[in-house]
Amino acid sequence: MTLLNPEEVVQLTQEIWAALVAPQGTPQLELDDLPGYEVLATTDITGEWNGTVCVACSRAAARRVTSVMFEIPAPELTETDIADAVGELVNVVGGNIKSLLPGPTVLSLPTVVDGSELSLPDHLELATEVRFSWMAEPVLVSVWTDVSPR
C-alpha cells in the first residue's frame, strides 16, 4: 500500500522551500534530475508508521540554503551552520510528511552527514523519491518505509 504519492511530496517540499529558502524573487525548487548529493540529512518517523525521511543536496546548495535561512554571508558560514540548516530543512519536510501518514507518530531529531557516510539500514525500502534542482544544484527528498517485522 502506498501512503504517499510523489505529487504530495513535490507540493509540500516546494511550499516549504518557498517559505524557508526561496523568498520572493529568487529561484524556486524545480523538478529535475541532477547528480551530486554531498550533504544528507535524515529524520525518523516512528509509531503507527515507521520510516525515514531524507533530504540530500550538493554542498553548494547546502551553503546557499544556510546563507538564506540564517541570513549569514556565505564566506562566514561554518560547518555547524550548514548542518543546522540542512537538519532544520529535513525536520520541517519530515514533519509535513508525518502529517500525511497514519498516526500517532513521533519525529526524531535530524542527523546530518556527508553524502559518502550515509548508510541506510537494510530494513528500509524506498517508498517515494523526488529529485529537484535549485539554482542549478541538485536536491533530493526521499521517504523510506521500515519493512522490518513488528
Image: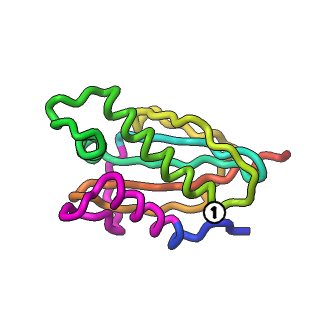
* Colour mapping used in the image: rainbow
The residue under the point 36% across, 68% down is 31
The C terminus appears in which quarter of the rendering? top right
What span is in magenta?
9-37
The amino acid type, in three-letter code, at marker 1 is Leu
Q: Is residue 7 above or below residue 142?
A: below
The residue under the point 51% across, 61% down is 129
Q: Give percent across and percent down for residue 93.
A: 49, 53
Identify the element where label 1 is drawn: loop
The N terminus appears in which quarter of the rendering? bottom right
Q: Give percent across and percent down for residue 3.
A: 68, 66
Q: Give percent across and percent down for residue 81.
A: 32, 31
Q: Is residue 119 above or below residue 97?
A: above
Q: Nearer the viewer, residue 24 or 74?
A: 24
Q: Give percent across and percent down for residue 69.
A: 30, 44
Residue 68 in the figure: left or right of residue 6: left
The residue under the point 60% across, 47% down is 52
Q: Which residue is mark 1?
A: 100
In this view, the residue farthest toward the right is: 150
